[in-house]
Image (spheres, rainbow, N blue to C red):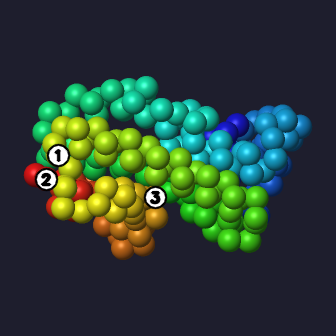
Amino acid sequence: MVEAAGEVFSEHGYQAATFAQIANRAGVSIETVRTHGPKAALMWAAVEVASFGVEGDIDLFATDLGKTMLEVGDPYGFAAFLGETMLAINEPAAGVWTAVTGAAHGDRELRSHLAQRLAAIRKQVANVLRVVAERGWLRTDVPFDDLVEACCVITSVESYVRFVRLDGKSPEEYKAFITRTIADTILEC
């Protein structure tokens, strides 16, 4: 049902998406969709499932993805890993994330949830960059908070949408862009 909600929100946007469309796509009743929560809750669940395959807050280092990241042995390998990872996260989440950010402009509740989600993403990025710093791979000539913000912008869904969907670059070009930009901007390679 949550995957169906993500598809409907991606296709129709937040305002135009209905419980009936979601129920029809998921093959369940409208009542079943309503029991999952208000439309905003369904949208956030759809973002989470599209991004990481699960609902709810996660500790990146407790996931297979985070464990794999901890095994990377050099800074350029980390940059390449991040390129692959951000493509794997941003590609499926782009449609529903765009619906969320668009709807948040006119909906106070969604705007509040978006601010909370962005803060949680920033916290995860800071945690990752602390590990990178402990390994001696992080630039030291730029304040840590600036590196966190730069990494958030470079790896954001909005950057993916701009680069791939609007500018027409391929997913491989996006991966290469993330790898190169993280290596040049964030890391001591």
Point out the tag, 2 or 1, that comes first from the N-terminus.
1
Residue position marked by numbered label 3 in the rendering:
157
Amino acid tagged 3:
Val
Report helix, strand or loop for mark 3. helix
Pointer 2 and pointer 1: residues touching (CB < 8 Å)?
A: yes
Pointer 2 and pointer 3: residues touching (CB < 8 Å)?
A: no
Point out the tag, 2 or 3, that comes first from the N-terminus.
3
Q: Is residue 147 left or right of residue 56?
A: left
Residue position marked by numbered label 2 in the rendering:
188
Image quarter in which the N terminus is found: top right
Q: Is residue 149 left or right of residue 80?
A: right
Q: CA distance from mark 2 to mark 1?
A: 5 Å
In the rendered image of this protein, does residue 113 appear above or below residue 29?
Answer: below
Residue position marked by numbered label 1 in the rendering:
137
Report helix, strand or loop for mark 2. loop
Crowding at dot 2, Cα within 10 Å, few <14 / some 14-19 / many 20+, comes out as: some
Residue positioned 82% across, 47% down in the render: 38
